[in-house]
Image (cartoon, helix red, strand yellow):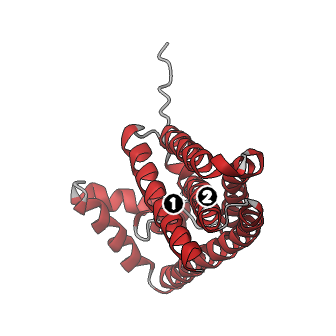
Amino acid sequence: MRMMHTEIHRIERIGWLRAAVLGANDGIISTASLILGVASADKSGGGAILAGVAGLVAGAMSMAAGEYVSVSSQADTEHADIARETQELASDPEHETEELAQIYAARGVEPRLARQVAMQLMAKDALAAHSHDELAISDATTARPLQAAMASATTFTAGAAAPLILTVISPPNVLLPVVATGSLLFLALLGMIGAKAGGAGMLRPTIRVMFWGALAMALTTGIGALFGNVV
């Protein structure tokens, strides 16, 4: 008896994974950068904690709103395309069958067979066939605004909490190196988790996220120190 071959594909994760990684990454980088910028200007550490809390709340709401609006626009476009395709299927099904057959033929299917496949798929679920093969819209990749917004806000909060906790527990005299080093380690961990969840190699994503995080933190620390000395 032949055993069924099961393949694992990670494309189904692309929607929430993108939003989750973006949210956590932004939470760590923006909050750590904000804390370091304020701490480098105000050595007491009190202002850094307040800035970190404000950055966490504002950032989480901004991420949720931005992601919801962005993905909603994508969803609106998908719905408009599907509505247009539904109308075309109702008004000219023969042309739509030929259009689907040409898509399969362009992929290498023999023209007669391509038309037979198109006719069979049209008979089963014409809209699903055209949505998937003509519009490239499927259940795995369709836009889900609320899911993306919740994922971004939640993961931003989780990411921002990491440097904020380091700020709370660090003595003022070592706050800068502790928050900077700890945040970079958190970014490295995030890069590895995101790569693992997406089935990609770990080295490049980890280096990439650490580089941009270090650059952002270095710039804000330098600006904070400069303006702190001036003021």
Please say if 25 is above or below 67.
above
Looking at the picture, tell me which residue is in the foreground, 211 or 137.
Answer: 211
The amino acid type of the residue labelled 2 equals: Ala
Q: Please give left or right for residue 211 compared with residue 60 in the image.
A: left
Looking at the picture, tell me which residue is in the foreground, 9 or 159.
Answer: 159
Q: Which residue in the structure is indicated by mark 1?
A: 217
Please say if 82 is above or below 114.
below
Q: CA distance from mark 2 to mark 1?
A: 7 Å
Residue 200: x and y, percent? 41, 40
Which circle marks residue 206 in the picture?
none
If you read the primary sequence from the N terminus, does the residue marked by circle 2 or circle 1 appear first?
A: 2
Looking at the picture, tell me which residue is in the foreground, 196 or 7.
Answer: 196
Q: Please give left or right for residue 30 compared with residue 119 in the image.
A: right
Looking at the picture, tell me which residue is in the foreground, 47 or 5.
Answer: 47
The amino acid type of the residue labelled 1 equals: Met
Q: Residues within 10 Å of mark 1 (few under 14, many from 20)?
A: many
Please say if 27 is above or below 79.
above
Picture mark count? 2
Q: Please give left or right for residue 113 compared with residue 28 in the image.
A: left
- Secondary structure of residue under mark 1: helix
The quadrant of the image that shows the C terminus is bottom right
Image quadrant of residue 47? bottom right
Residue 49: x and y, percent? 76, 61
Q: Residues within 10 Å of mark 2 (few under 14, many from 20)?
A: many
Residue 133: x and y, percent? 41, 63
Please say if 22 is above or below 102.
above
Residue 228: x and y, percent? 59, 73
Kindly identify the residue that appears in the image at 44 percent across and 44 percent down. Answer: 206
Kindly identify the residue that appears in the image at 72 percent across and 68 percent down. Answer: 51
Q: Which residue in the structure is indicated by mark 2?
A: 32
Viewer can see residue 122? no
- CB under 8 Å between discs 2 and 1: yes
